[in-house]
Image (spheres, helix red, strand yellow):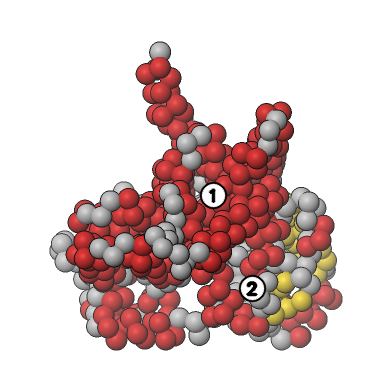
Amino acid sequence: MHLNKKIILDYLVPFFIFLIFFVIGLNVYKDYGISFDESQHRETGRLYYYFLKGFFVNLDLSEKVLVSDIKTAIQEFSFMAPAFFDMIAEFYIDLKNITAIEEVFFTRHLFNFLFFLVGCYFFYLILLKIFENKVYVYLGVFFLFFSPRIFSESFYNNKDIIFLSVTMLFIFFSIKFFEKKSYLNAILFGIFSALAFVTRLPAIVYIFATYLMFFLQSMDDEKFLITNYKFLTTSLLTTIIFVYIFWPYLWIDPFNHLFYYLKVVTRVMPNIQNYYLGEYFYFKDSPWHYNLIWIIVTIPISITIFFTIGFFKVLINVIKNLLLGDQKNHKFWKSKKEMFDYYFLMIILLVFITKIKFATDYDGWRQIYFLYPFIVLIALNGVCYINSKLKFNRIVNVIFLALFLELFFLTFWIYKYHPHQYVFFNPFLKNLVVGKMERDYWGVSNRSALEFIGKTDNRNKIKIATISFASLENSLQIMNKNDRKKLLIVRDLNHADYAIDSYRKEWNKPSSFFNLFKTKFKKIYDLKIDDNVINSIYKREN
């Protein structure tokens, strides 16, 4: 009986949880619009995939990508970016001979979700190493998967959600490397360090944090470096080799290209401004609290509360420990769990410090979505700490009940406002920020707007323009063939039957453009999500 119970808890429960997650994704992946730079990512993946394919297969001249083509393409910044996910997606698209453009993007969305599901599974494995009580483990997985913004973007955000997922793989293998120094763990750690780095450059922060932890271990143990230098060296060499392998831009002239990319990466920014707390800011001029406020107003309130408790608990422990640093036989941590707590705290602090000091801020906090699993993890530490201090089981049960009720609310919200979960705001703080923060910054809702026009206007040809930043041409690609023939995208309002506003201001348009819009077009429809208008349709008045 004990064995059966163990099998159920250890294998069957997580199997069915992730099976349910998979079925959910399989049923909704075709429902989302297209993000504003997804087409460019697809082109980057195609370029490098066909370049690589040419080494193994005899291609027609029309398909073959030569070194000269790569050199021409990388004059544009977008083709310099890492393309690991895009190449994998393109391989499957080519393997299955998928040619219909909407099916191409549906396939990318499914693959995006599957990467996220893998990230959730590795987060589950990480939680198993931290918590003995499985309730905390399942709570952590649910709060990651059913976070509305994370959930929706898991289908089309092929940068930040992929990075979040790769980060979980990195953390899992870094923990394995902490637990046992061996050549196998060193190589795996090096491979996933490289994969994280080429997915997004901020990975350098938590890679640095990992080696800093090794440095602290060496201060606790004089023999640490003598015993483990060969494994640390192996991990560094593996990282360098696989950065080159995973990043196509480096295949030609790796050193010059790497230094050039690092030089220009922060200079290439779209010509838009941040709308934050009712004001517009240039990217580099956003207030220091930009990401902090975005996180607070868009994650579950219970995670915010318990993260605060868990954060200060760990921080106080760290400070106490450092103050005792001059004592004989001092150790930076007393247990494996305490070491992991310090590790996760260090990552969060380093990311925020570097983000405030060096980075540019735009599109909410999506560039640091990869921190959300750490936030959930530290929040669970906060729950665990509070429960350990309480003497009454009833209060502990109330806390768990409140957490599961919030999960139920999040799940219901995801269902009710599908497929526009990307504009979720915490209901306790929503009224303070709705209308004062960016809404659909990627124009994903444009698909819904175009579908509305297509269904309500019976003409064979309809001309549509946008007054916002996001391209309608992108959104049209993920719609069916009949809609693509029927809906014509125009840039001149004089020729448009309809105008769409996804509420991200286009700064390059002349004042005459907006004057024409105000005098010739009348609003006929608002797409409203949880009392927040995220897209509006205007029709030309005769």
**Is 266 located above or below residue 314 in the figure?**
below
Q: Which residue is mark 2?
A: 469
Residue at 75% across, 61% down = 536
Between 23 and 120, the one lying in front of the other is 120
Tag 1 secondary structure: helix
Question: Which of disc 1 and disc 2 is earlier in sequence?
Answer: 1
Tell me what residue is drawn at x 56 percent, y 73 percent: 353
Q: Amino acid at mark 1?
A: Leu
Which quadrant of the view contains residue 49? bottom left
Q: Nearer the viewer, mark 2 or mark 1?
A: 1
Q: Amino acid at mark 2?
A: Phe
Quarter of the figure with residue 293: bottom right
Q: Residue at (45%, 81%) from the top-left corner?
A: 265
Question: Regarding mark 2 in the picture, which secondary structure is present there?
Answer: loop
246 relative position to 469: left or right: left
Q: Residues within 10 Å of mark 2 (few under 14, many from 20)?
A: many
The residue carrying mark 1 is: 377
